[in-house]
Structure formats: structure tokens, C-alpha cells
Amino acid sequence: MSICLLAIPIALAMRAAMGEKNFNEWVESNTMRLATNFKDEQDLLQTVKGAGHDAEPWGEMYKTHIDKELWFFWEKHEGKWQANFSKSDDMEKIKIFFRDLQRKANRQILYVEPQATKIAPKVEGTLTTIYTDKELLEETLLKFGAQKKLYRKDRTLICELSGFTLEFRQKEPGVPYELSFTGQKDARAVYDAMRQLDEGYRSAVQERTYMNVRKKLEEKKMTVESEEIMEDNSIVLTVNI
């Protein structure tokens, strides 16, 4: 007789705890707004699409891609359409985009030419994680390039990763760590880093679970007939009992 043992991957749950007011102020401080002279919504759509670019509806805004990695929103503010970018976006690509758009439209669209100076605002916040294992968390951080200044104090773990200072605090054993982060990069950088860390931690947990299951099967003299990796990267073991 055979039985399947499914190792279910663990997902990382994160939520921002900045508060609505602080979050809105932080978003505003990280946004660069470029005013345009589009007459109305139809003028904007005809001009942008006529130049070969997309303009996808996003609620009351429109989303346009400059390339696969860089995109922005058109938003109507105080009766005028404006282009909203992150202050850390590639300014040279933005300038090239608008030069091409204005050339194809054969008219001036921006009120002010975007400046090449980039502003690196301070980014800070707090996230709740489901990391509970200190050893696995530390191994994963080192694997993904955490600096050697990584150190522990009581149940606090601090390190440098992807340009951010990360401080993981655990109130008591078995309770998920809370993460506080500070840095000078765009907020998307910390969330990209956390997604990578999520994958690494999830793989480490799954690997440990897999090894423990294999060990227990060997102790009970059970034979593994087959192993199958599923689409969600979980592992199915079929054993002969």
C-alpha cells in the first residue's frame, strides 16, 4: 500500500504598519509629478497611443510603460493631467520617453523639462513576518548577501541587505519576528528584497521538513517509491508501507 505525504510551502505574510496618514505622506514624498498641457482625457489617450505607447485604465488613472521594468501613472490633478514617477526612477529613460512623445506629437507636452537630479528619500517602516526560526532566518539572510555586520542580541537580529538596515525582533520564542527597516532607496527595493528572502526562507523550511520526513521514514524502515516536485514547488513523497 502507498501513501502520499505533501510538504506544503509556507507563504510570507507582510503588512505595512505605518498608519494611513504617515503612509500617504511617505508616498507623496517619494513621488515626482510632471505637469502636462493635455487638453483633456481624449487628448492624452490619442497622443500617447498614437505614439505607440499603452495607456491602461487604472481606476481614474492610466498606466503607461516606458519599458518592461519602468512604468508610471497619468493622473488628473486640479484639472490638469500629470505624469507621476518615483523619484528613484531612471531619469534618462524618462527624458527620452517625453522627447520621443513630443516629437511624434509635434508639440510641447511637458510644462517643465524633467531634471537629471535624483533624490534618494529616506525609507523606513515596519512589517510583520511569519519568520519564527532564528537559525533558518539567519542562514537565509547570509545566503542572500546580508553584510557581515549581522549580529544578534537577545532575540534581535540586525543586518544590512540590499541597501537597507533590517532589524528583526522576536518578543518571545516561537512568536513571529517583526521587521523594522530603514534605507535610502525606493520602497520597491525593500519589498523586492523581502520577496527574495521569502522564497529563500520558504525553501529552507521545506528542505528541513523534507529531510525530517526522510529521516523518520528511514527510522521506520519505510521505502520511498517516488518523489515528485509540484508546480508550487511542494514535494510529494510516495512511500511503501
Image (tube, grey):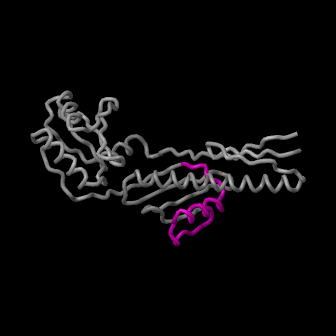
Depth order, front residue of 126/72: 72
Figure quadrant of the N terminus:
top right
Figure quadrant of the C terminus:
top right
Quadrant in the picture for residue 24? top left
Residue at (32% x, 30% y) in the render? 57
Residue at (20% x, 51% y) in the render? 96
- Residue found farthest to the bottom: 148
- Give coordinates of residue 185: x percent, y percent: 37, 58
- Give coordinates of residue 200: x percent, y percent: 58, 56
- Give coordinates of residue 61: x percent, y percent: 29, 33
- Is 101 left or right of 176, judged from the image as shown? left
- Is 201 left or right of 85, judged from the image as shown? right
Residue at (36% x, 46% y) in the render? 68
Depth order, front residue of 19/115: 115
Is 185 included in the stretch rendered in magenta? Answer: no
Q: How many marks?
A: 0
- Residue found farthest to the left: 107
Depth order, front residue of 130/237: 237
Residue at (62% x, 42% y) in the render? 231
Give the residues drawn in magenta, as a range.
128-155
- Is 178 left or right of 55, judged from the image as shown? right
Judge whether 143 appears above or below 32 on screen: below
- Give coordinates of residue 138: x percent, y percent: 60, 63
- Residue found farthest to the top: 42
Is 149 included in the stretch rendered in magenta? Answer: yes
